[in-house]
């Protein structure tokens, strides 16, 4: 009986070790929108007291707004270079502020690949985190581009994490160690 208990205890302890190692190995990369490596108009820097660091990047609102049915009127963008510490599947999240439901998304281009997008949710006129797609990234330097899809879209921060259960809710602390040339 005593042997059974000690075996059970060992099992519990070793599971705890495995779990804590797995937890510690999760990677979270947080980048401020205003800490881009390059920017192309109409993407521009804006200021707000409710943005992390007081700044964000955005596609400024146009008049008329959201009228162009053939697509974005330019390819304004901000490019970020990050050094991914280990290979994995990374979930993208972005802290955004949308003007309305005609100004609530960005294109996202990773390493010059096929554009995907983030946003198209119904939360407007409020800073909030939106969930993006997952990307398979190798260890090393990658480029993330946020590009004009609709005017009136603001980006305060974005993050990439291997932790699929992680849901950001407030301003995150930037992880400067993963930024390249910034
Ligand atoms: Ca910011």
Image (tube, helix red, strand yellow):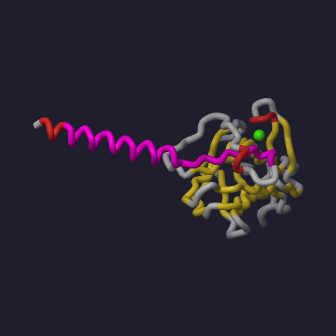
Q: Residue at x 66, y 63 (%)?
A: 116
Q: Main secondary structure of the magenta part?
A: helix
- Nearer the observer, 90 or 178: 178
Number of disc labels: 0
Residue 43: x and y, percent?
Answer: 85, 52
On the question of residue 98 being in view, the answer is: no
Q: Nearer the viewer, residue 106 or 16?
A: 16
Question: In this image, 121 relative to 40: left or right?
Answer: left
The location of residue 83, given as percent across then percent down, is: 69, 56
Query: Percent from the top left, x then y, of residue 53?
Result: 79, 35
Q: Residue at x 15, y 40 (%)?
A: 3
Q: Residue furthest bottom?
A: 113
Image side of residue 52 versus residue 135, left or right? right
Residue 75, by quadrant, is bottom right
Q: Position of residue 23 (x, y in %)?
A: 48, 44
Q: Is residue 25 visible?
A: yes
Task: Name the residue: 40% across, 45% down.
Answer: 19
Closer to us: 96 or 83: 83
């Amino acid at each position: 009986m005593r042997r059974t208990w000690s075996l059970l205890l060992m099992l519990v302890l070793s599971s705890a070790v495995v779990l804590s190692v797995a937890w510690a190995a999760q990677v979270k990369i947080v980048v401020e929108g205003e800490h881009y490596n390059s920017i192309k108009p109409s993407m521009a820097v804006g200021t707000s007291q409710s943005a992390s660091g007081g700044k964000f990047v955005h596609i400024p609102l146009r008049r008329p707004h959201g009228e162009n049915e053939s697509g974005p009127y330019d390819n304004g963008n901000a490019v970020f270079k990050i050094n991914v510490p280990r290979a994995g599947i990374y979930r993208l999240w972005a802290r955004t502020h949308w003007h309305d439901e005609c100004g609530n998304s960005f294109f996202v281009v990773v390493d010059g690949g096929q554009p995907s997008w983030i946003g198209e949710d119904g939360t407007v006129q409020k800073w909030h985190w939106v969930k993006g797609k997952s990307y398979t990234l190798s260890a090393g330097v990658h480029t993330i581009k946020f590009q004009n899809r609709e005017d009136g879209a603001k980006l305060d921060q974005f993050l990439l994490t291997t932790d699929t259960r992680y849901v950001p809710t407030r301003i995150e602390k930037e992880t400067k160690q993963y930024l390249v040339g910034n």
